[in-house]
Amino acid sequence: MALLKRLAEGDRPALDFTLDGAPASGLLGDTVLTAVLTCSEHLRGSDFSAEPRAGFCLMGACQDCWVRLGDGRRVRACSTLLEAGQQVCREPGRSL
């Protein structure tokens, strides 16, 4: 079940992406964090214990929302806009 439920702005165009190799969908203008949490129960696993994490500061100041994109880049999910076809890898419990 998704951690977040979208209550508004549902009329924006949908963007398909992959999350850990599985098909997922977000909306144009979503951050990667928003897109992941509206279709999943967590953003990634902790680097130390693999416990589920959902981001912390939500403004790009902490280190809690790092994910890896299909092109190898490591980005903060809270400040990276979702793109169509993007591949997002959470790599739970491993250092990104």
Image: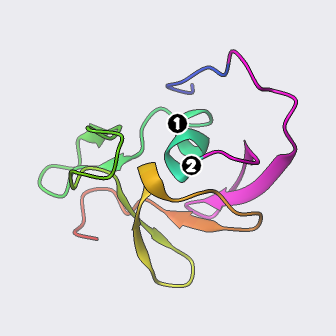
The image quarter in which residue 18 lies: bottom right
Q: Determine whether the residue tagged by mark 1 lies in a helix, strand or loop.
A: helix
The image quarter in which residue 2 lies: top right
Amino acid carrying label 1: it is: Leu
Q: Is residue 88 magenta?
A: no
Residue 60 rendering spot, x and y as whole percentages? 32, 52
Tell me which label, 2 or 1, sits earlier in the chain: 2
| Residue occupying image coordinates x 37% and y 63% | 91
Kindly identify which numbered label has been placed on residue 12: none
| Relative to 6, residue 58 above or below | below
Between label 2 and label 1, give the one nearer the viewer. Answer: 2
Quarter of the rendering occupied by the C terminus: bottom left
Given the current orientation, which residue lies at the most extreme bottom position? 71
Q: Which residue is mark 2?
A: 31
Tell which of 33 and 2 is nearer to you.
33
Residue 8 rendering spot, x and y as whole percentages? 72, 18
Disc 1 crowd rating (10 Å Cα; few below 14, some 14-19, many 20+) is many
Given the current orientation, which residue lies at the most extreme top position? 7
Q: How much space separates mark 2 and mark 1, taking CA atoms?
A: 10 Å
Q: Is residue 25 magenta?
A: yes
| Residue occupying image coordinates x 21% and y 56% | 63
Quarter of the rendering occupied by the N terminus: top right
Q: Determine whether the residue tagged by mark 2 lies in a helix, strand or loop.
A: loop
Task: Tell me how the rendering is colored.
Answer: rainbow
Residue 5 rendering spot, x and y as whole percentages? 61, 20
Q: How many marks?
A: 2
| Residue occupying image coordinates x 59% and y 57% | 81
Disc 2 crowd rating (10 Å Cα; few below 14, some 14-19, many 20+) is some
Q: Which residue is mark 1?
A: 37
Magenta residue span:
7-30
| Residue occupying image coordinates x 71% and y 59% | 17
